[in-house]
Amino acid sequence: MRGWEGWDEYAPFYDWENARTLGRRDVGFWRRLAAASPGPVLELGCGTGRVTLPIARDGVSIVGIDRSVEMLTRADERQRRARRPLAAPLVRGDIRDLPFVDASFPLVIAPYGILQSLLRERDLTATLAAVNRVLAPGGTFGLELVADLPSWEEYRRHVRLRGRRGGGAHVTLVESVRQDRRRHLTLFEQEFIERQGRRKEQRSFTLAFRTLTVPQMVRRLEKAGLTLSALLGDYRGRPWDPQAEAWIVLTRKPDCSAPRFHLPPMRRSSRIAAAARTGK
């Protein structure tokens, strides 16, 4: 199993589901972080442009990269529908081998658990090495993990969501979740049932996420040469703990001589250092 399976199939429903779950709660955080960057921003796994395009509307230079053609097609459509032209290049590519010049981005972001879709350790290692390469000295790499995946409750065929999406079609999401403890994976088996008049379509696929904890991810980031700046537990900058609603990690590429830009206001906690030393 590779982490990119299912994302093309998910693309028609991605914005519909997120509007009913996460919504835009995280977008403001990434916009503030991007606004503080002294140069261009790179977003890993930009998908349909849910985060990329609001940042571009703020006048920030940003590039999005994603593997999924279907996701990028929707991002292009969203960009064309914008009231004013947006300069946000969208690149189809592999985040394990970023097609960008060394040290070209003062800020790289990976929202919404994109790194957890790297199911093999070597893929994560390659991605973090690529991020370090394209990150400017003194630059920041910020990422979010899907919170509490290691203890996510298993269930079978729950009706998670119902509602209408563009064009008036009625959509039902039937979801099953199972934990593969041996491989440290959480598997979301999704079935979208779409009805419009007499027409009925069903699409089924599985999205897999690696169940890395914050301390585990921090150790991998540090091994890749990045220095921990902060662990945040929500989108307002509160400190992280294992029960936090969001798991956000901010790191920096060391460079004593480079000027630093200011991160959004945040509180630090003595639990950060302790947490980073625990786990596998």
Image (cartoon, rainbow, N blue to C red):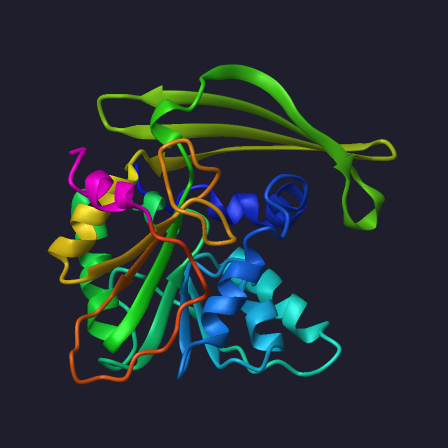
For image coordinates 46% across by 49% down, the residue present is 112
Q: Range of the magenta residues?
A: 269-280
Q: Nearer the viewer, residue 156 or 249?
A: 249
Quarter of the picture holding the C terminus: top left
What percent of the width, then of the height, locates residue 251? Answer: 27, 61
276 in the magenta segment: yes
Single out the residue that lies furthest toward the right. 197
Res 152 → quadrant: top left
For image coordinates 85% across by 31% down, the residue present is 198
Residue 161 shown left or right of residue 106 in the figure: right
Quarter of the picture holding the N terminus: top left
What percent of the width, then of the height, locates residue 125? Answer: 17, 53
What percent of the width, then of the height, locates residue 178? Answer: 41, 20
Residue 262 shown left or right of residue 219 in the figure: right
Compared with 181, 70 (above or below) is: below
Q: Nearer the viewer, residue 43 or 262?
A: 262
99 in the magenta segment: no
